[in-house]
Amino acid sequence: MSLRSQFRSLIGQTSPFALELEIAGADGPWLIDPSGKKYLDMISGIGVSNLGHGNRGILDAIREQSEKYLHTMVYGEHIQSPQILLAELLVSLLPPSLNTVFYLNSGAEAVEGALKLARKFTGRPGIISCKRAYHGSTYGAMSLMSDRSKTDPYRPLLPEIHFMEFNRLEELEKINLQTAAVVMEVIQAEAGIRLPDPAYLEALRKRCTETGCLLIFDEIQTGMGRTGSLFAFSPYGVVPDVLILGKSFGGGLPLSAFVADKKLMAVLADEPPLTHMTTFGGHPLSCAAGLAALNQLVQTSLVHDSISKSDYLVKKLDQELFPALRRPPGLWLAIDLADPLRVQQVIARAMNKGLLADWFLFNDESIRLAPPLTIRYEELDLAAAIINECLSLEKSKSPVLS
Ligand code: PLP
């Protein structure tokens, strides 16, 4: 039986249209299949491999930590230096009110933790989320999803969840004295990279402060350099009460966290204690990898350089072949094609030609590009050439698979 048929029979599937790319190796921005064919990874595992595959510093950190110890006790009991070193570096890069780190494994788990923190701290029930946001697939995180076609089969969801339109000032009135928290992506990822107006974020912060609810920024996808700054919120100057990190935060290993002020975080520790727990959260291996990754981001010019790399890529793309493009300053692009079928065709063609691009969960009219920040200029040349070719091929109505 081939590995592909075993994959189909043995592995629980998430959709009927899996990519089914068999991975034999990965190096820098390249994924390699068993035949030796190389694919330029312009997705980074949906914003995880921001430092590329097989990153030497991260692998060394994992090896060194693995020789000391792996798991020793459920989270929060033992003192493990990788957790502390990573938290120390992380909070040194954040505003003073974001000074305490609660580690978990996945993005959704960190969202769950932040929701519990908000309800316990405020004693209020309401949570406000934005339409077309994605915060994860566990029950609480999924309850923050406005798309009923995806959530209906799983109802009942968490109660007291309300939705507002992203970037719409008048919708901020939905935040009231019953609201425990507003959970928001600073830049909406799965909606197709939707950037906020700075004035909107400022008004949001003001409204949360006035009503006494917590502002929670989900930077699971935008964080760790993806948007041209270490965190997407920083250039806007709007500080959340809780910051959620995941994906690239673990340097390729499972790691997430929510970060808040000590006085907020303290509510999870007592009255009653032991009401938010995890066995593996903040695993020493993940924290060692995350620390190595974060050190690279702050000690090199990778994040800063990603802005000129993004500009370079955009200049190389033939703008006549698509109606619009959205992006923050960094290496994260949504190419609008205004046609879902065309999006699928271009992605399939690009894969044939050795380039991996992706679509968005709540926007089927755009192509997502999110390469590792370590990608080189000559690789961007190649990426642009393949994308231009695939876009122009589509215009001439050639078959999907070439
Ligand atoms: N929040 C955002 C913005 C995400 O993009 C994702 C995953 O794509 C999540 C939360 C959920 O993260 P995880 O898949 O690690 O649970």
Image (spheres, helix red, strand yellow):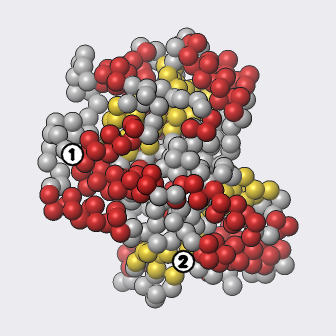
For badge 2, the amino acid type reads Tyr
User: What residue is drawn where x is 38% and y is 53%?
Assistant: 295
User: What residue is drawn where x is 69% and y is 29%?
Assistant: 200
Examine the rendering and report whether any part of residue 70 can be seen.
Answer: yes
Residue where numbered disc 1 is placed: 81
- Tell me the mark number nearer the camera, choosing from 2 and 1: 1
Gap in angstroms between the C-alphas marked 2 and 1: 37 Å
Quadrant holding the C terminus: bottom right
Local SS, label 2: strand
Q: Nearer the viewer, residue 226 or 307?
A: 307
User: What residue is drawn where x is 48% and y is 26%?
Assistant: 241
User: What residue is drawn where x is 39% and y is 70%?
Assistant: 54
Q: Is residue 44 above or below residue 179?
A: below
Q: Position of residue 280 (x, y in %)?
A: 25, 46
Q: Determine which of the numbered discs, if any, sits on residue 39 in the image.
A: 2
Q: Is residue 271 above or below residue 154?
A: above
Query: Is residue 57 rendered to the left or right of residue 336?
Result: left
Q: Nearer the viewer, residue 25 or 317?
A: 317
Examine the rendering and report whether any part of residue 158 can be seen.
Answer: no
Query: Is residue 309 rendered to the left or right of residue 255?
Result: right
For badge 1, the amino acid type reads Ser
